[in-house]
Image (cartoon, helix red, strand yellow):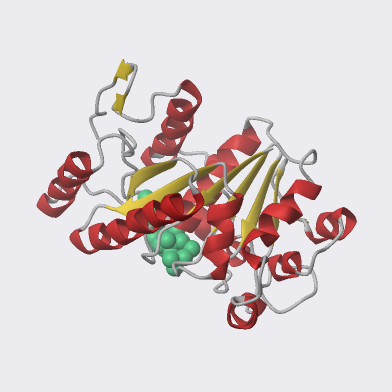
Amino acid sequence: MQIWGVVNQKGGVGKTTTTVAIGGILAKQGQRVLMLDLDPQGSLTRYFGLSADDSDNTTASLFDEPSAVQIINSVRPTGEPDLSLIPGSAALSALERKKASTGGMGMAIARALRLIATEFDYVLLDSPPVLGLLMVNVLAASDRLMLPSQTEPLALEGLERMVRTLEMVKKSRGSAPPHLIVPTLHDKRTRAGKDCLNELRRRYPDSLWRGAVPVDTLLREASRQQISPAQINESSRGLDAYEQLLRDIAAGTECVETPDKPGAWMAV
Ligand SMILES: Nc1ncnc2c1ncn2[C@@H]1O[C@H](COP(=O)(O)OP(=O)(O)OP(=O)(O)O)[C@@H](O)[C@H]1O
Ligand SMILES: [Mg+2]
C-alpha cells in the first residue's frame, strides 16, 4: 500500500480536485484506491454525492482506535470500480479542538491504515487547508506528499508557508516524506500565470513537477456530474496533465533536477 497525502495550508488551490483526479486515473488502471476525506468541509465526500453529515462511519472514527473490520465497514463505493472513500464530517473539526493536545493522536491515521494495508494499493489523503491535528496526521502517515499550488501571486505565499512547515517537520523528526509541488489552475495566457510558473521554477527546481495542470472547465464539469475526471469521455487538457504527472512519478522523471538525471520543463 502506498499512502499519498495532498496538502497545502492555502485554500482553493486544487487539493480535492488533485485527489479525485489521481484517484480516478489509478483506479481506472486497476489499482485499488481508497480516498480519505480529512477535511471538516467534506468537499471530497460531497463531490461523490455522499453526505458529510455526522455519522459513525467517517474519517473521524479513525481517531478512536477502530479495528480493521470497523475501518472496512466505513469504506463507501464511489460508483467507479476500484475507487472508494471514507467520508469526512463536521465531527472532524470538533476532533481538531478536542484531541489536538492528546498525546499520540498525530499517528492515528497512520495506525489505522496499517490495519488495512493489504486491502488497497493506494490511499490518498485529502487534507484541509489548516495546519492542525488533521494535517499533522496526513504528514505523518504519507509516503509521498503532493502540494498543489495555484499559479497566482497569493498562492505562492501560502506555498512558501507549507514548504517551511515541511522543513520544520524534517528538523524535529529527522525526516519528512518527499514532496512534489504541482502547479494547478494554470492560465498560460495571463502574465501573472506565466510569471508565477517561472518564479516557482526558480524557487523550487528540485521539488516542482516539470508540468502544470491548466485551468480546464471539464474538471469542473466532472465535479458537477459527480464523477472523477478519468470518466470524462471528451478530451481534457486537465486530465491529460494529471495522467502525465502519474507517468512522470512512475518513471521518476517528475522533477527537472535530480542528482543523476537532467530533465526538462514541459511546455505548458
Ligand atoms: N485545473 C482546474 N481547472 C478548473 N477548475 C479547477 C481546477 N482545479 C480545481 N478547480 C476548481 O477550483 C475550485 C477549488 O478546487 P479544490 O476544491 O480542488 O481546491 P482545494 O484546495 O481542495 O480547496 P479547499 O482548501 O477549500 O479544500 C473547485 O471549484 C474546483 O472545481
Ligand atoms: Mg479541498
Label tally: 0
Q: Please indicate, yes or no, whether residue 231 appears anywhere in the rendered image.
A: no
Instruction: Residue at 48%, 32% (x, y): give it.
Output: 246
- Rendered residue at 67%/53% (across/down): 110
Q: Is residue 133 visible?
A: yes
Ligand 1 location (quadrant): bottom left
Direction right: furthest residue: 69
Name the residue: 39% across, 64% down.
9
Where residue 99 sits in the image (x, y, percent)? 64, 77
Q: Would you place residue 175 above or below residue 126 in this image?
A: above
Q: Which of 132 and 17 is in front in this view?
A: 132
Observer-nearest of 84 and 102: 102
Q: Is residue 116 left or right of residue 247?
A: right
Left or right of 43? Residue 30 is right
Quadrant position of residue 37: bottom right
State which quadrant residue 154 falls in.
Answer: bottom left
Q: Is residue 222 left or right of residue 57?
A: left
Quadrant of the snapshot with the C terminus: top left
* Farthest residue, direction left: 191
Location of residue 261 with respect to 31 vertically, above or below: above
